[in-house]
Amino acid sequence: MDNKKLAGLLFPDIDKTPADWEAAFPARDLPAEAKVTRMGPSPTGFMHLGNLYGAFVDERLAHQSGGTFFLRIEDTDDKRKVEGATELIIRSLNFFGVSFDEGAGIEEDTGDYGPYYQSRRAEIYQTFVKDMIQKGQAYPCFLTSEEISEIRAGQEAEKLTPGIYGKYAAHRDLTMEDIKARIDAGQEYVIRLRSTGTENSGKTFTVTDAIRGELTMPENFQDVVILKSNGIPTYHFAHVIDDHLMRTTHVVRGEEWLPSLPIHVELFETLGLPLPVYCHTAQLMKIDETTGVKRKLSKRHDPELSLDFYREKGYHPASVREYLLTVLNSNFEEWRIENPEADIDEFAFTTEKMSNSGALFDLNKLNDVCKDVLLRIPAEELASFLTDWAKEFRPDLTALIDADPAFLAKVLNVGRDQAKPRKDLVYAQQIFEFIRFYFDEYFEYEDEAPENIPAEDLPAIIESYMATYDHSDTQEEWFNKVREMAVEKGYAAKPKDYKKHPEDYKGHVGHVSTVIRIALTGRSNSPDIWEIQQILGEETVRARMQKYIDSL
Ligand code: GLU
């Protein structure tokens, strides 16, 4: 077979050589330790937690080492393409503080290693495939999908490894005339790698995965498709060519790609290109609520897999970042205890500290992390985050917030400036639910007064409370008055007195203040009453008390 002639026949329009592309995309001008990473999402319009998790690893590796993190859109599968997906990818990662230095952009691409859309790189891929044909490393295969199904069915019946390899690679050695005749007859074909491996040869290769350490696997023996009939490459081939020419040093991708690693290693070797460092991340897992068993997060069952979930609920990006780091690096939590105020980017992230056996995702844990993270964010900053969130997801609240922006910050600050600050705030939706009683428009009675308080005492308590109420009282003066009033009405001054002699009292001071609390907030649980009153102002306090009496 005259391979040169065959290459000319299959790729008459390709006049470049691999060397031309090597020259067009020279090694990057970066210090030796700088890492170049990339995210290669398919533009499906769905961004999930796994994307963010991976992007976060990419971003940390690149930016911690003074390297580059770029975005490449893997749009070789037309069927899954969604309009506006690139914008969605960029915006949703930006929201979580992950930004690209280079690559596909919203308006235009940036960087010298493009195009950054695989669909625009056909000429590049075909140049390398043409070269492989010339060297006898690849060949056209005209097997139809029916023929391939038949081969597979036969292999299954005989319990053999499925695929096109060895004697099943029926078109490995077609003659030039045969190939020509088939092309002239309009038969479709793909290009396959002519693998040098054989099944069960016992030959293995070893690579060092930055997360998993040394991996030893059997060599590839499948004649995998590298170029589809439309001239667009498969993932395998595009990965090898792109990551080489874009000078990626570290390939961070999900562990679902591990089984394909032998193919990629053979392709790199065949092309004579150096291997990047692979970092295969663990699957995101969760404990199933009903079965209690650890399982993969699923798009259908777990809304928390979608990144939209966090934006819609109003999780602060800093808390999601903080939480992801606890999942990503086993030593992060310890670091945080030692460095409670430090900027998260000061933490030295390493692939070695990543789990390789399934990263456990737990919403409750995320919520706990949120409580701590939000405490570190100044109330004014939190107020402006909530304002932005409300504009998008709760427009009904914006007029209220805008009417007095300082009010929201004051409300958010309640219970924070104390030795043991309250940890009430988790995410925007929950926060508005939590603080809604501060706004007359959203105020509601949610709880009942304590059962041991006789009905006729309810208005009496509020009336006495109002009679001595002085808005300028200190917290201590205020509480002393409440206690005196409680005692006057037959309630114990201290809960423990009531516990000892319940027959002597109707209840204790706590029951009485619960009545006031309900009148004020509609709830039997809330931050400090005095503090809330100071924020609401005297007029509102009096109006709420009257409203409660009227409601009885
Ligand atoms: N397009 C691939 C995916 O969506 C990218 C895998 C990789 O990062 O190499 O999974």
Image (spheres, rainbow, N blue to C red):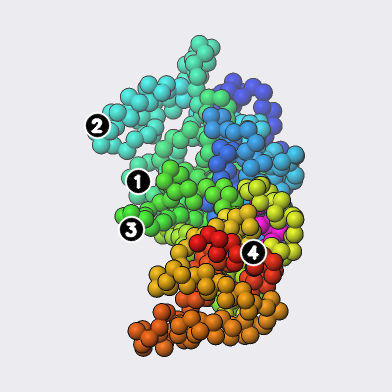
State the mark number for residue 157: 2
State the mark number for residue 292: 3
Q: Secondary structure at mark 4?
A: helix
Residue 25, given in percent of the width and then of the height, sits at 71, 44
Residue 527 figure quarter: bottom right
**Ligand 1 sits in quadrant:** top right
The answer for how far apart the CA atoms under marks 3 and 1 are is 43 Å
Q: Which residue is mark 1?
A: 201
The answer for how far apart the CA atoms under marks 1 and 2 are is 23 Å
| Residue 497 or residue 172, whichever sits in front | 497
Q: Is residue 16 left or right of residue 511?
A: right
* Residue type marked 4: Ala
User: Looking at the image, is mark 4 or mark 3 nearer the viewer?
Assistant: 4
| Residue 295 or residue 164, whichever sits in front | 295
- Magenta-drawn segment: 382-390
Residue 393, given in percent of the width and then of the height, sits at 62, 47
- Is there any visible trace of residue 305 in the rendered image? yes
**Which residue sits at x=42%, y=21%?**
144
Q: Earlier in the sequence, mark 1 or mark 4?
A: 1
* Residue type marked 3: Gly
User: Looking at the image, is mark 3 or mark 1 nearer the viewer?
Assistant: 3
* Residue type marked 1: Ser
